[in-house]
Each structure stands twice: as structure tokens, then as C-alpha cells.
Amino acid sequence: MSQNNMSIIDHIEELRKRLVIIVVFFVLAVIASFFISQPLIKLIQHASAAQDITMNAFRVTDPFKVFLQMTFVLAFILTSPVILYQLWAFISPGLLEKERKATLSYIPVSVFLFLAGVLFSYFILFPFVIRFMLGLSSNMEIQTTIGINEYFQFLFQITVPFGVLFQLPVVILFLTRLGIVTPMFLVQIRKYAYFILLVIAAFITPPDLISHMMVTVPLLILYEISIWISKVGYKKAQASAAESDED
């Protein structure tokens, strides 16, 4: 059934079916993550960023809380391709055949960019921030006692949002192919977008200039890449529209 011939009830039923599939896969991912979480937590504790840190549990439930947090984060990452595919499957009936094929290819790219953002923030940004904070404590002659719950919360606070922000080029290209945004519009709002990215970077990083710039600069570069990708997508969309008019 095409998107145009579907009633509101059909849309709701289709959405319900997609959500059920996502929930089922998420539950399976949670079960799988139960077996991965503990080894991964141990690996992170012995990583270079945590070499000089003794992690403490200030509450009896802290280790279990960290275990659950890691489990659900892993489950979300494992389920993300399914979420993206179900989203594509829900909106694809309203797209042209060429648009369906083009947007389907965004899914592996989106997953790759998310993982790239997480790895970039974990291996480059996170160790720098930890060293900066410990160095600041040392200079102020403060004995730092780090709780494992606070450590992993801080880790997730930096890595997961950065992985989401790395989706910017794919999101922009998707919106361009749907005709919602144009490269001209992105250029027009550039200064406002820069300001928003600066604010987002301030929320992700600690209040020091170097950490802030380490997040802001990649985000600004991503925005410029998004404009360039939008121009390519816009030209292809215009060419597809011209072909459709000729047919």
C-alpha cells in the first residue's frame, strides 16, 4: 500500500508494527549486552585514561548501576541499525524509487559515523579531559577520590552525545534529499548554527577553553562538511526531479 493511499489508522498500525520490531530487537540486544558489559567495564578500567585512577564504589549499588548503564548503552548501539532501518521503512513508501535506494544507503554510513564519534571522543577527548582534571586537582593539592559511578557517567556524558552529533552530515543529506533544507539555507543560517554548536560543546565538555575547542572545532568542521554534502545531494535531487518531469 502506498503512502498516499494509507489512512491515519493504517499509519498508526504501521508505526506500531515498527515500534514492536524495535522493542523486540532492543530486548535481544539487552540480553546480549549482559554478557558483554562486565568484560568491557574491566577493559575501560584498565585503559590508558584510567591507568592512574583507583575507582571506588561509594554505595553498595554503584557497581550494579554502572553495569546496567553499560548494558543499556551497548543495547542502544546494537539496536541503532534496526531503529534506522525501521524509520526508513516507515517513511520509504512516500519516497521515489531513487530516493528509497539513496536513503537506504545512509543507514550503514550513519552507524559508522556514530561509532567514529564515540571512538574519537573516547580515545582523544576523554583522556585529555581526565588528565586536565587530575592535573588541576594536583596543582591545587586536592586528593581526588573517584567513584566508579561518577567516572562512567562522565564517560557516557562525553562519548554518547559526540556519537550522536557525528550524525550531522547524514541528517543534513537526508533532509536535503527530502527537500526540507537546501545548501543555500544552511549557508544563510551558518552563524546561528555555529552559535548552537558552541553551546552544545559547552554542555558536553568541562568549563575550560582547550576542552571546549577540542569539541567545537570538529563540530564546526562537520557543519561545513554537511553544507558540502548538502550541495551534492541538492544537485542529485534536482536532477531526479528533472528526469521525473521529462518522464
Image (cartoon, rainbow, N blue to C red):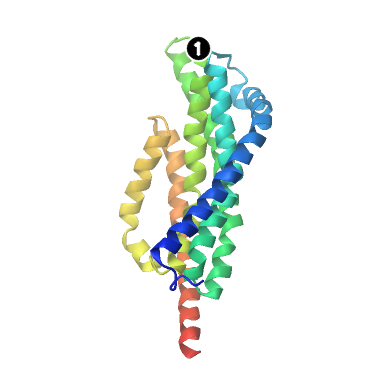
Q: Amino acid at mark 1?
A: Arg
Residue 230 appears in the rendering: yes
Question: Residue 179, how many percent across, how many down?
Answer: 40, 69
Q: Is residue 156 left or right of residue 181?
A: right
The residue lying toward the viewer, choosing from 200 and 127, is: 200
Res 189 → quadrant: bottom left
228 lies above or below 210: below
Q: Is residue 164 above or below residue 173?
A: above
User: Residue visible at 62% across and 40% down?
Assistant: 29
Q: Is residue 22 above or below residue 175?
A: above
Camera sees residue 127: no
Report x, y in % for residue 163: 52, 44
Q: Disc 1 designates what residue?
A: 59
Residue 215 point in image, percent of width and height? 45, 41
Q: Position of residue 69 (x, y in %)?
A: 54, 29
Q: Nearer the viewer, residue 103 or 55?
A: 103
Q: Residues within 10 Å of mark 1 (few under 14, many from 20)?
A: few
SS for tag 1? loop
Residue at (52%, 54%) from the top-left corner? 17
- Res. 184 image quadrant: bottom left
Residue positioned 58% across, 42% down in the render = 26
Indicate the quadrant where residue 136 lies.
Answer: top left
Residue at far bottom of view:
246
Where is 150 relative to 4, above or below?
above
Task: Judge from the rendering whether residue 42 lies leftward or rightward of residue 100; answer left or right.
Answer: right
